[in-house]
């Protein structure tokens, strides 16, 4: 019997926000058990992502999350933090993949071969599955941050630099989940 060849899809969510972690997911789908409706998480409604998340977790051969915290983002920059979070997600899998399909054009350092695919979450179901898990996990966490940091609107904008969020930064100040290396946060620190 030949050893199975495992392909992992890897994607991230949260490079652009001013607050919160960058979250990544790694998913190995079961080729004998396809999942209908997988698409780039940004093109799905929140309700549809919430419906797909348990299906992906149940049907996948393996899945795992990875993350990099705001202080890590500030120390090593958002790109390096994203690659680190991707590496962590893949290392958290209980199955070692043979190959990785990574959304984007930058490759994390992995113990398997890697193909980077720009907009891979739109063309590869395994990357789309990872994008859904990462987005649901990060959004859920940012909604919880609303209770810890009232007034910032994290449940609505998830930390992205909306006008409301930037005004809250000026009015309420910088929290410990804000990324101090990002310009709007630096401006708020100086005001």
Image (tube, helix red, strand yellow):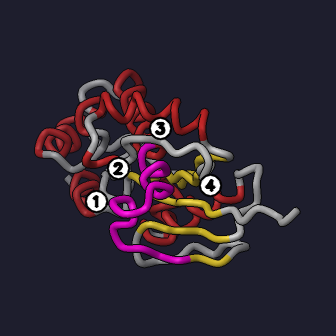
Position of residue 97 measured from the top left corner of the image (x, y, whole percent)? 70, 63
Percent position (x, y) of residue 171?
17, 37
Q: Residues within 10 Å of mark 1 (few under 14, many from 20)?
A: some
Residue marked by disc 1: 186
Q: Residue 120 occupies which quadrant of the picture?
A: bottom left
Alpha carbon of mark 3 to alpha carbon of mark 4: how far? 13 Å
In the image, the segment drawn in magenta is 115-132
Pick whichever, 94 or 74, lies toward us.
94
Residue at the right extreme, as displayed: 1
Mark linked to residue 83:
none
61 lies left or right of 147: right
- Residue with the mark numbered 3: 137
The secondary structure type at the circle numbered 4 is helix
Question: From the viewer's perspective, is 160 left or right of 71?
Answer: left
**Neighbours of disc 2 within 10 Å: few (<14), some (14-19), many (20+):** many
* Mark 2 or 1, nearer chain start: 2
Alpha carbons under labels 2 and 1: distance apart = 35 Å
- Which residue was labeled with disc 4? 89
Dot 1 or dot 3: first in sequence order is 3
Q: Is residue 101 magenta?
A: no
x and y percentages locating residue 53 in the rendered image: 47, 34
Determine whether the residue tagged by mark 2 lies in a helix, strand or loop: loop
Label 3 CA crowd tier, 10 Å (few <14, some 14–19, many 20+):
some
Where residue 90 sits, quadrant-wise, is bottom right
Of the numbered discs 3 and 2, the one sitting upstream in the chain is 2
């Amino acid at each position: 019997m030949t050893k199975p060849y495992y392909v992992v899809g890897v994607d991230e969510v949260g490079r652009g926000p001013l607050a919160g972690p960058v979250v990544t997911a790694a998913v190995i789908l079961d080729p004998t058990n396809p999942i209908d409706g997988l698409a780039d998480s940004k093109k799905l409604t929140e309700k549809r992502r919430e419906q797909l998340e348990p299906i992906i977790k149940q049907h996948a051969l393996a899945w795992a999350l990875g993350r990099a915290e705001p202080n890590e983002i500030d120390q090593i920059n958002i790109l390096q933090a994203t690659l680190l979070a991707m590496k962590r997600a893949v290392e958290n899998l209980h199955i070692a993949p043979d190959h990785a399909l990574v959304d984007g054009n930058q490759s994390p350092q992995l113990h398997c071969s890697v193909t980077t695919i720009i907009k891979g979450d739109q063309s590869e179901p395994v990357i789309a599955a990872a994008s859904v898990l990462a987005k649901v996990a990060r959004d859920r966490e940012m909604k919880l941050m609303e209770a810890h940091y009232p007034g910032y609107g994290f449940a609505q904008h998830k930390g992205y630099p909306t006008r409301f969020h930037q005004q809250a930064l000026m009015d309420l100040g910088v929290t410990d989940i804000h990324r101090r290396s990002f310009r709007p946060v630096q401006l708020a620190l100086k005001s």
